[in-house]
Image (spheres, rainbow, N blue to C red):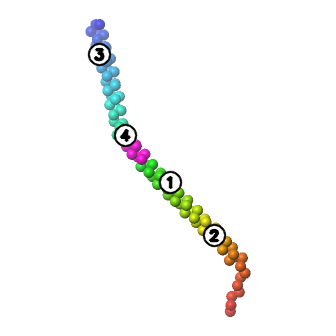
Amino acid sequence: MSLTKQNLAMARTLGVALVAALTLGGCATYTDEFATINSRLDQLDSKVQGAAQSAESANQSAQQANQRLDQIEGRVQQLEAAPRRVPRG
């Protein structure tokens, strides 16, 4: 191999090594970003779970209110159907 071919081979090898080093070095910085993203996802998950529990609680309260209204409705209809009393005096 002549000196030029050796230089070319060495330059090519160094170029590949440099590209590989930069690529792998860039991947190492994503660890912190992934940790941040995972933390935010965990926070969002807990907020969603809290909202789901609040919605379930509100749904149960609404069902209880509807049951109470159904109970009162019969009494209201009886009072409305009762004959009017004439005031004294």
Q: Is residue 54 above or below residue 79?
A: above
Q: Which residue is mark 1?
A: 52
- Indicate the amino acid at tag 2: Gln
**Do the residues bearing badges 1 and 4 touch, measured as CB atoms within 8 Å?**
no
On the image, the x and y values in percent for residue 86 come to 71, 86
- Of badges 2 and 4, nearer the viewer stands 2
Q: Nearer the viewer, mark 1 or mark 3?
A: 1
Q: Is residue 55 left or right of residue 66?
A: left
Residue 10, numbered circle: 3
The residue where tag 4 is placed is 33
Residue 46 is a magenta residue: no
Disc on the earlier residue, 4 or 3: 3
Cα separation, mark 1 vs mark 2, equals 29 Å
Q: Are the residues at dot 1 and dot 2 in contact (C-beta closer than 8 Å)? A: no
Q: Residue 66: image x %, image y %?
A: 60, 65
Which structural element holds mark 2? helix
Residue 80 lies in quadrant: bottom right
Q: Quadrant of residue 85?
A: bottom right
Horizontal and vertical percent for residue 89?
Answer: 68, 92
> Which of the marked residues, 2 or 3, is nearer the chain's N terminus?
3
Q: Residue at x 28, y 7 (%)?
A: 2
- Residue 26: x and y in percent read 34, 32
Q: In the rendered view of the protein, which quadrant contains the N terminus?
A: top left
